[in-house]
Amino acid sequence: MTKPIIEFNKIPITVLQGFLGSGKTTMLNYILTHNEGMNIGVVVNDFGDINIDSKLIKSQSDKQLELTSGCICCSLKTLDLQEAIDQFVFKGSNIDYIIIEASGLAEPRDLALTLRTTLGQKVRLDGIVTVIDAENIEKNAAEHDIARDQILFCDFVVINKIDLVKPDKIQDIRQMITSFNPRVRVLESTKGRIDIRLLLDQDLYKSRALPSSDASIDDHDNHPDDHPVDHSDHLHEKYTSYSWTSPEPLHPMKFQDFVNRKLPTNVYRAKGIIDFGLKGHSRKYIFQLVGVRPELVWENWDQKPLTEIVFIGQDIDKSLIKKELEACIDDSPDKQLEGNIELKLPQKANL
């Protein structure tokens, strides 16, 4: 029997950034037309900078566009960032997700700092996604600091337009990316088509069941043969999820070392509930990882302590992750942390 995992009350925000011509708008259009049933609020710098397909547009005012998919688009030309976000965050709002499409020349360092420190109580930063142009990224990175910083200050890099370059160049691009940001998660796409369940993690804001350890989120596995598949829109990469459960407490320092040093970079997201036993003051710890950014917060248990974690990525080595997690099990769960260290983490806001 599966159990619900994490429930967040805040609306998650994902940022799409990338140098001029990288394909951000194309990817945004793809997300809006493959929105997994979500109502998405979109914030853009200027309507003149975005070419949303006319078939998606329902009506327009000086501040926002209403899209036929149920999405609403706000412009930073007439609103500041907080005002734009406030368009979606109000009592009775049916917005599930907010996407900010940053200008190709926006300063990524300042943007990341602003989003991670000044967002309100009703929203939270989920991820920062940098879209790069496979044909021109090496030239852009060599000539423009912003193009390099966009790789440094993000959780995911999407190498777009891979159909326009040879496979050996993609490998060179991957090496360049990891030379700037060794732990960043790297995805590939053609014409902005990507499995949005990796970029917009719906499971983090609604109670969902843990998938089985063999579950795949590839479209072919989730749709039986009696549902026709549009091969022109098919994503050739197969993404999988792996879940792990333990009735025994984990050692917090060992788990931290696993997340910081041993978790493979082909794991794009992870989330779960962790029991650190006495070392965690018998509290429940909520864990999430988005790209390179892990987070732990605590709250009180409302049921028997049990560790449940799910990992989402590509070609996940399940046996390796299982081995590393089993090594995190605390062999002295009835003892305090060594050296009288106190585990101090923020408590989850109860909104």
Image (tube, rainbow, N blue to C red):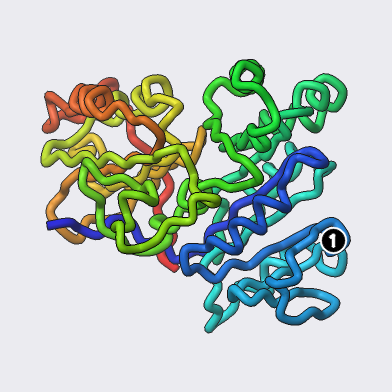
Residue 257 horizontal/vertical position (percent): 36, 22
- State whether residue 191 appears in this view: yes
Total residue callouts:
1
**What residue sits right under mark 1 in the picture?**
46
- 149 left or right of 92 in image: right
Quadrant in the rendering for residue 351? bottom left
Horizontal arrangement in the rendering, residue 172 relative to residue 54 (left or right): left
Picture coordinates of residue 100, whole percent (x, y)? 68, 56
Task: Name the one closer to the observer, 224 or 16.
Answer: 224
Q: Does residue 161 appear to the left or right of 273 in the view shown?
A: right
Residue 187 pos. (x, y %): 54, 35
Label 1: which secondary element: loop
Residue located at (12% from left, 57% from top): 1
Q: Would you place residue 100 above or below residue 165 in this image?
A: below
Between 324 and 25, the residue placed more toward the observer is: 25
Q: Amino acid at mark 1?
A: Asp
Q: Can residue 275 be seen from the camera position used here?
A: no
What residue appears at the point 85 percent right and 56 percent down from the top-left corner? Answer: 49
Res 324 → quadrant: top left
Q: Is residue 298 left or right of residue 30?
A: left
Nearer to me, 232 or 50: 232
Q: Residue at x 62, y 42 (%)?
A: 129
